[in-house]
Amino acid sequence: MPIPGMDDKAMASDCLASQKFLASSYNHAITECANDSLLRDFFSVYQDEQNYLKMVFNAMQTHGWYNLQMANTQDINQVHQQLRQESTKLQTQAGMGPSPGVYPGQGISPGQMGPGGF
């Protein structure tokens, strides 16, 4: 039964937002869980939610409802520079020197970012 005022695209967008929220919630539960058995259960559900999220994303892309715009190299480099600066600032405020390997100028290449990455 259709929901008044919501077309297929709006319902799919709502579904995608809900899946993102669920995946985020299970991710949080995983990071806070101290019980190994419960952790495995949370992780299993988390993987299912990620799969459902990907299915909704793929369906929206197929219908032309979710179009990605590729970031150019300059924008990616600018974000890396901002992250490096923020990391250094936070480490300085915490009284720590830069950590080896945190942002050594090697960054993440665009091909290493998955769907939903920046």
Image (cartoon, rainbow, N blue to C red):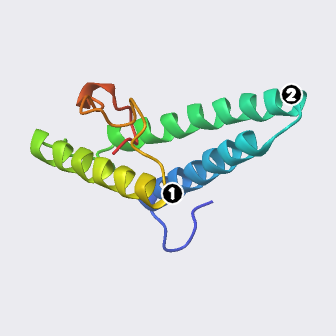
Q: Name the amino acid, label 1.
A: Ala
Q: Name the amino acid, label 2.
A: Asp
Query: Considering only vertical position in the picture, is 63 above or below 41?
Result: below
Q: Nearer the viewer, residue 45 or 39?
A: 39
Q: Residue at x 52, y 59 (%)?
A: 14
Which residue is under mark 2?
A: 36
Residue 71 shows in this picture? no
Q: Residue at x 20, y 43 (%)?
A: 76
Q: Quadrant of the N terminus?
A: bottom right
Query: Considering only vertical position in the picture, is 49 above or below 44?
Result: below
Q: Position of residue 74 (x, y in %)?
A: 10, 45
Label 1 close to label 2 by CB (< 8 Å): no
In space, the residues marked 1 and 2 are separated at their CA atoms by 32 Å
Q: Position of residue 113 (x, y in %)?
A: 34, 32
Q: Which circle, 1 or 2, is nearer the viewer?
A: 1
Q: Residue at x 24, y 33 (%)?
A: 105
Q: Nearer the viewer, residue 101 or 51?
A: 101
What SS does tag 2 mark? helix
Q: Quadrant of the C terminus?
A: top left
Q: Position of residue 5 (x, y in %)?
A: 49, 74
Say whether residue 32 is left or right of residue 93.
Answer: right
Q: Nearer the viewer, residue 118 or 79?
A: 79
Disc sitting over residue 94 in the figure: 1
Say whether residue 56 is left or right of residue 110.
Answer: right
Query: Considering only vertical position in the picture, is 117 above or below 114?
Result: below
Residue 51 lies in what quarter of the image?
top right
Residue 37 shows in this picture? yes
Q: Residue at x 44, y 52 (%)?
A: 91
Q: Earlier in the sequence, mark 1 or mark 2?
A: 2
Q: Position of residue 43 (x, y in %)?
A: 72, 31
What SS does tag 1 mark? loop
